[in-house]
Image (cartoon, rainbow, N blue to C red):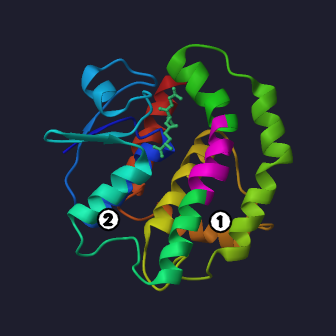
Amino acid sequence: MKLYGSSYSPFVRKVMAYAIERGIALEVVPIRFRDQDPGFRAASPFGKMPALVDGDFGISDSSAIIAYLEAKFPDGGLIPTDAEARARTIWFEEYADGELGEAVFAMFFHRITLPKFVGQPGDAAIADAFERDRFPALVDYLESVAPAEGFLVGDRLTLADIAVASPFVNFRHAGVRLDAARWPRATAYLARVHDRPSFAPIIAKETATLARMG
Ligand SMILES: N[C@@H](CCC(=O)N[C@@H](CS)C(=O)NCC(=O)O)C(=O)O
């Protein structure tokens, strides 16, 4: 199976980490933001990454891709079947893709994507205003739900942990430093997820590449 995307996208990184946790082999085909690659475009009607191609089948959107992989490889899935746990997992995925995704768009997009990957100046004021005015409430929420030990839903890793941890990698790349005194549970929880073999090598590679780019 081919996964088109760049791990700098929180949505691509989410699928990559999910696949590593599940032991599902994906060939990552690197593409750029708004890439015109025909294989990618055929699977992603609006040109958004990630896109997955499995033989004749193509699908885009990280949630749709993970729904496909959950159905195709049902043993050991990361979306619980219990009604409440399932709903909470999807809630956290929505918090990540929606609220935190908006934060990525404001801060990472303007500080990193535009200047470093697209070659255009970002709007620092948009990023700064978001970090100052809106970002703290998003982390306050994570602080209120982050467990002292273990995971967001139940007693095992689920898609909730992967989805929530992924955009925080972007915030770190964008120079956002979480205040561990204000958010002790959230910072410790995120560090635990980011230390997993599904995230740590990806984060290290991204960080080294950004450092080389200056
Ligand atoms: N809901 C989608 C969001 C995908 C998305 O917005 N990807 C961005 C990169 S982070 C993209 O490719 N944007 C291109 C564009 O907006 O034209 C998902 O979960 O995959």
- Could you tell whether 123 is left or right of 65 in the image? right
Residue on which the image places disc 2: 21
Magenta run includes residue 146: no
Which quadrant does the N terminus fall into? top left
* Foreground residue among 63 and 196: 63
The residue under the point 81% across, 48% down is 134
The residue under the point 27% across, 75% down is 76
Residue 204 appears in the picture as rendered: no
Question: Measured along the vertical axis of the image, is residue 169 above or below residue 207?
Answer: below
Question: Measured along the vertical axis of the image, is residue 110 above or below residue 133?
Answer: above
Image coordinates for residue 202, horizontal then vertical, percent = 39, 48
Comparing labels 1 and 2, the label whose residue is closer to the camera = 2
Label 1 packing within 10 angstroms: few (<14), some (14-19), many (20+): some
How many numbered marks does the figure carry?
Answer: 2
Which quadrant does the C terminus fall into? top right
* Foreground residue among 137 and 174: 137
Image coordinates for residue 205, horizontal then vertical, percent = 39, 42
Inspect the image, locate mark 2, and give the three-letter code of the amino acid beneath it.
Answer: Glu
N-term-proximal mark, 1 vs 2: 2
Question: Measured along the vertical axis of the image, is residue 65 above or below residue 160?
Answer: above
Gap in Å between the C-alphas at discs 1 and 2? 21 Å
Secondary structure state at the residue bearing disc 1: helix
Residue on which the image places disc 1: 187
Inspect the image, locate mark 1, and give the three-letter code of the amino acid beneath it.
Answer: Thr
- Could you tell whether 45 is left or right of 70 in the image? right
As drawn, the label of residue 172 is none
Range covered by the magenta-colored residues? 95-105
The residue under the point 59% across, 29% down is 112
- The secondary structure that dominates the magenta segment is helix
